[in-house]
């Protein structure tokens, strides 16, 4: 069996007033082609399908058109979508009866029966060629405070914290599922921030429950063979690869430009699940000018002159500009905006930086007790390369460290 894990589509997002609809449509075309080419049996989308809790009619039409197109080309594909913190939970579930008839399952909220999570709603069997279950998916959306029984917002000793409540939630649900699943593979879905995951600025909201915004990966019981997560936009693995973020579909902020955007393909052989990242080409370039550091207005003009005009305005490059202050910021901002208006680009943002003072003495080196392996890696990386490690470098370091 083969599955594809995706998340954080954020349909309906705009960037500095620019619609991303054409980019989303092109991404979904590429995703559909990949599902067909890789002969995928199961599609998992782990939250933040929409960018807002009140998506526009155009955003909803794009989503349903995409689902229809996928099912037309892959009638036997099973699709499971769970809600994220951006999603309209109840609206996502409203057409569940209709979509369910096409093997498209939508779980926007936690459903309970007799005070316990409803296993019939959240544990979804994935049939094999003969129709009998070949795997199970524990489909859990973004957990709100009301979903975690016994959660205390106080920090008093002995009271249930968000970590304890989340751990018990997954433990109880897994324990209840055991009689049904037997020795078949179990995949869990979730939408949250796991400790150790690298977050990006500008598109991800810190989701606070009980004063905490991150939980450790070990809240997921060992019996769960793979955890398909959404919320953090950089593709990354935790807990030796058992817990994974697939990442967002394309850059949703400046901090995501250098991410490897795409999806995760899962090869499922019994309870052995092998995850492989697969890049999907960006539907439109997202650029930082310059790629590192800052530039002058003259350098900006030269860089913009090298960008060729594309056939579609909605797929022109989105450009973030980092300028070195040469004169009054208001004057520079006006000139930069004029240059961008005349170029075949979509301006995403302009920042003006003052020249740094390098005359200050360097800070004393910390003692071994005050540092960490990751901090030492960052220091060594910068000394060798001349710039600080990016999120992708830190993620690779953490992957290596988890295997030691």
Image (spheres, helix red, strand yellow):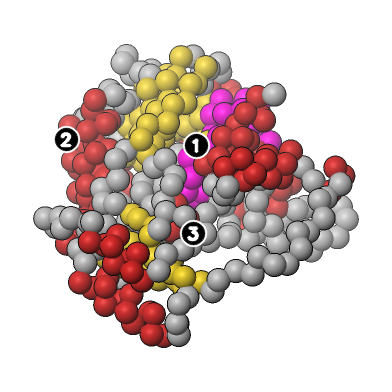
Q: Which type of secondary structure does the marked residue at label 1 adopt?
A: strand
**Which comes sooner in the sequence, label 1 or label 3?**
1
Q: Which type of secondary structure does the marked residue at label 2 adopt?
A: helix
Pair 2/3: label in front:
3
Q: Which residues are magenta?
A: 218-242
Tell me if 302 is positioned left or right of 404 in this view.
Answer: left
Residue at 33% over, 62% down: 319
Circles 1 and 3, Cβ within 8 Å, touching? The answer is no
Residue topped by disc 1: 228
**Which comes sooner in the sequence, label 2 or label 1?**
2
Quadrant in the picture for residue 213: bottom right
Q: Nearer the viewer, residue 318 or 59?
A: 318
In the image, residue 53 lies in the stretch drawn in magenta: no
Residue topped by disc 3: 293
Residue topped by disc 2: 72
- Using the image, determine if residue 113 lies above or below residue 21: above
Pair 2/1: label in front:
1
In the image, residue 235 lies in the stretch drawn in magenta: yes
**Mark 2 and mark 1: Cα distance apart in space:** 25 Å
Residue 55 seen in the current view = no
x and y, in percent, of residue 204 in the image: 50, 58
**Mark 1 and mark 3: Cα distance apart in space:** 35 Å
Tell me if 279 is positioned left or right of 270 in this view.
Answer: left
């Amino acid at each position: 069996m083969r599955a594809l894990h995706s998340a954080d589509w954020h349909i309906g997002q705009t960037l500095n007033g620019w619609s991303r609809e054409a980019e989303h449509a092109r991404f979904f075309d590429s995703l559909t082609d990949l599902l067909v080419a890789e002969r995928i049996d199961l599609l998992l989308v782990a939250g933040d399908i929409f960018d807002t809790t009140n998506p526009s009619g155009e955003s909803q039409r794009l989503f349903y058109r995409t689902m229809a197109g996928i099912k037309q080309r892959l009638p036997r594909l099973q699709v499971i979508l769970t809600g994220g913190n951006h999603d309209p939970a109840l609206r996502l579930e409203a057409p569940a009866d209709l979509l369910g008839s096409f093997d498209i399952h939508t779980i926007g909220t936690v459903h309970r029966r007799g005070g316990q999570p409803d296993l019939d709603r959240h544990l979804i069997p994935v049939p094999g060629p003969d129709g009998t279950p070949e795997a199970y998916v524990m489909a859990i959306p973004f957990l709100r405070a009301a979903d975690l029984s016994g959660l205390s917002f106080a920090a008093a000793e002995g009271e249930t914290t968000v970590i304890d409540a989340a751990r018990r939630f997954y433990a109880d649900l897994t324990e209840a599922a055991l009689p049904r699943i037997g020795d078949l593979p179990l995949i869990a879905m979730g939408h949250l921030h796991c400790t150790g995951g690298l977050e990006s600025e500008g598109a991800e909201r810190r989701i606070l429950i009980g004063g905490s915004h991150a939980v450790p990966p070990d809240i997921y019981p060992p019996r769960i063979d793979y955890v398909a997560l959404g919320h953090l936009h950089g593709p990354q693995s935790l807990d030796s690869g058992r817990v994974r973020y697939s990442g967002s579909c394309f850059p949703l902020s400046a901090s995501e430009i250098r991410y490897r955007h795409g999806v995760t393909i899962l090869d499922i052989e019994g309870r052995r699940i092998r995850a492989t990242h697969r890049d999907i080409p960006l539907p439109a370039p997202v650029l930082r000018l310059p790629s590192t550091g800052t530039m002058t207005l003259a350098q900006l003009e030269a860089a913009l002159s090298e960008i060729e005009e594309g056939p579609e305005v909605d797929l022109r490059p989105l450009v973030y500009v980092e300028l070195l202050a040469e004169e009054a910021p208001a004057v520079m901002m006006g000139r930069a905006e004029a240059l961008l208006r005349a170029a075949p680009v979509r301006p995403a943002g302009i920042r003006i930086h003052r020249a740094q003072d390098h005359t200050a003495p360097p800070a004393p080196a910390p003692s071994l007790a005050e540092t960490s392996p990751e901090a030492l890696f960052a220091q060594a990386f910068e000394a060798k390369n001349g710039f600080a490690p990016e999120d992708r470098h830190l993620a690779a370091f953490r992957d290596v460290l988890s295997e030691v």
